Image (cartoon, rainbow, N blue to C red):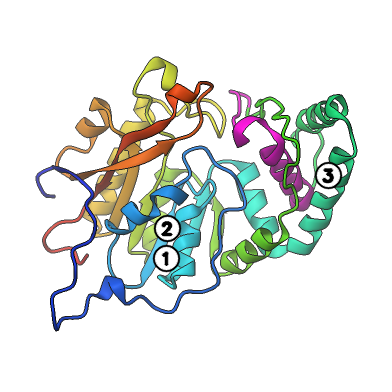
Amino acid sequence: MTTAVSRRIQPAHPPTPGKPDLRLVPAEPRERAQPFLKWVGGKSKLLGQLSELMPHGPLRYAEPFVGGGAVFFWLWSQRRLDTALLCDLSPDVIAACEAVRNRPGELLQALDLHERAYLRCDEEGRAAYFYAVRERHPADHPVDDVARAARMLFLNRTCFNGLWRENSRGRFNSPHGRYPDPKIVQEDKVRAASEALKDAEILRADFRALPELVAQRGLDFVYLDPPYHPVSVTSSFNAYSGGTFSARSQAELADTCRQLDAMNVRFLLSNSDCPLIRDLYRGFRIDTVQAPRSVNSRGSGRGDVGEVAISNRRPGLAW
């Protein structure tokens, strides 16, 4: 393990004359796949910065907090993946990924029914429809993966700020968003995501199982995007999968990363830039990236915010 380094990401250096720059000559990209869920803390706008910190070459990839999956979809579109394991603890996320992968046509039909029922209502009727769907939790009204996924995507696209948030009982509780013309079906996005997910294993699993899963599958790179540790009391948002991701959980995640490092498995982890996180990952490489903050009730609270990208890049570990 190397001494901790903290730096701000800079644009890539130009290639040396006469020497090819492998980063600037990628494999022919596929038609781009993108997240089909709007996700708080999603990495779509950080891909340029994060790509500078990822290992070269094809990857045998794992992502234990897949959420919206922006990094996975980007790597797949760039033909960077030999294999991929996508995990999340949220049963809704896993059901959505499996329905998009396995039954996209049925899912689109279910979303079309939601869209027709919702858009034909006036404002008061739309709110009533939203809250009726929100209250029919799959734990109380068992449904298959398609219906569960359609419920999640409908709520995700019509709730306030696309904020998928759950209480301590695992119940989605974001309010209605009142958008004039929400795009609920989004067929092209679902179809493209379905193609990408056909190349991935999808598994509901806790991050603590990661070392065993990685060893079993011979994986060599892990990207971790956990619920961020709050930098202040008012900034806390880490309850997308029910309850909170505590300081103890953050410490256990750091221990998991140390296990990966001992296995010579490369990792890159995103989190908030705060003393606890820097202390937990002391000894690893710590880079700083600038992330747009878009979820805030006040416009003045939006803008770029510093985050850390932590990796085990070190001598002796191919990068």
Disc 3 to disc 1, how far (Cα)?
Answer: 39 Å
| x 54%, y 66%: residue | 32
The kind of secondary structure element at disc 3 is helix
Disc 1 to disc 2, how far (Cα)?
Answer: 10 Å
Along the viewing direction, whichever of 18 and 93 lies nearer the viewer: 18
Please identify, in this view, whether the residue under mark 1 or under mark 2 is nearer the observer. 2
The tag earlier along the polypeptide, 1 or 2, is: 2
Is residue 42 toward the left or the right of residue 136 in the image?
left
Residue 141: image location, x then y, percent: 82, 36
Please give the residue where the numbered disc 3 appears in the rendered image. 114
Is residue 299 toward the left or the right of residue 305 in the image?
right
Q: Is residue 163 magenta?
A: yes
Please give the residue where the numbered disc 1 appears in the rendered image. 217
Is residue 236 at least partly visible in the picture?
no
The tag earlier along the polypeptide, 3 or 2, is: 2
Is residue 295 toward the left or the right of residue 149 in the image?
left
Q: Which mark is residue 62?
A: 2
Q: Main secondary structure of the magenta part?
A: helix
Q: Which residues are magenta?
A: 144-169
The kind of secondary structure element at disc 2 is strand
Dot 3 amino acid type: His
Q: Is residue 153 magenta?
A: yes
Given contact means CB atoms under 8 Å apart, are the residues at marks 1 and 2 in contact?
Answer: yes
Q: Quadrant of residue 75?
A: bottom left
Please identify, in this view, whether the residue under mark 3 or under mark 1 is nearer the observer. 3
| x 15%, y 81%: residue | 19
Given contact means CB atoms under 8 Å apart, are the residues at marks 3 and 2 in contact?
Answer: no
The kind of secondary structure element at disc 1 is helix
